[in-house]
Image (cartoon, rainbow, N blue to C red):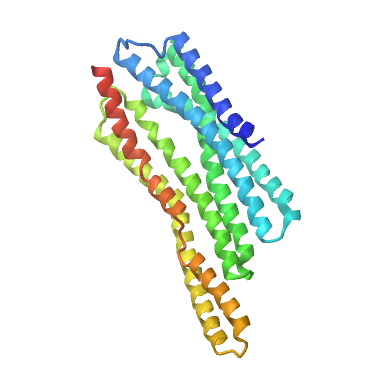
Amino acid sequence: MMKSQNISLILYPIALLCVLITVHILVGTISIPIPSVNAQRDFNTALGISLLTCYFLFALRYIHRKVARNLDKMLEMNRQYQSFYYHRSEISRKFKQHLICSTSIGFIMPIVYMVAEGVIMRINEPEVFFIAVTAIPFWVLTSLFCLQILTNNRYLRTLSKVVERESLSKQISVLQNLLTFGLTTAFTSLFAMAIMPVFWINQPVHVSDLTVIFIFGTSFSLIVLWPMLQLIRRLKSLSQQLIAANEQEITKLIQSADSNKASRKIEELLNEMERYKAPLTRGHAVYLNFCFLPLPFSWLLLSVVEFSFTY
């Protein structure tokens, strides 16, 4: 069952990518050799939009699956099984609202782009027309993905406050699961930036372009990662509280009369301290480091691609 779900997760995006690339090849937007500067720009735009559209379709499906798993795990820890479908329906309601908003953006942004780039006068050309048409699902999925990431992260963080009355170990466990989800979505979001240099294949990269990319990349990284940094700070505080509370309890147990019972309890408390002394697991650290890799890696890859085009 899980294997078929994993296959379906990537099957639809790959199928969509094949359809988009085939359409652009038939129309002539994607063709080699590239005869002119305009053709190169059309080639880059068609390829970049196709890749990002399919990536965001995959990312949306992947994030939705992660949200469902984390919601189920969080409610299980809170012993609130009966409220799973309520929270799932709330997330679905938000998704419908975001879909309406994203559809509006999807139809508006291609027009704005063509006016800004000065290609609106070339709309009668098949290449430009099909780029404009395929840009609609691109903007729909891009805006939908961004809205879903921000809303789902916020919703799960709000829901995590329900465990504030639970034991410190349970709070830490819930927040660690939430941090895993948050870092996964952050990496998934930032990896989309690795595809962006495709738009500059064999095109001059101006200082203004780099400035916009840097500002956008920094802003987006802060929006995505800042809540995770706050969550790490909260985890560190809870970990320190747990260690202090357990040390006090151990001191009392050492002074107690029942040594056999005390020794078992002390062993449990020491194991708990060992388990939760580090707020970040190795997996968290790996994901956090991965979040900073996509953008520099993408520009290195662009250099390799341009070199292959030149020679």
Residue 188: give x, y in percent of width and height.
47, 41
The N terminus lies in quadrant? top right
275 shown above or below 183: below
Residue 176: give x, y in percent of width and height.
53, 58
The C terminus lies in quadrant? top left
Residue 77: give x, y in percent of width and height.
66, 60
In screen coordinates, is 5 left or right of 243? right
122 shown above or below 137: above
Camera-nearest residue between 173 and 141: 173
Camera-nearest residue between 142 and 129: 142
31 shown above or below 243: above
Residue 278 occupies quadrant: bottom left
Residue 108: give x, y in percent of width and height.
51, 29
Residue located at (41% from left, 25% from top): 48
Residue located at (46% from left, 29% from top): 52
In screen coordinates, is 206 left or right of 81? left
Residue located at (51% from left, 28% from top): 54
In screen coordinates, is 48 left or right of 241? left
Q: Residue furthest front?
A: 260
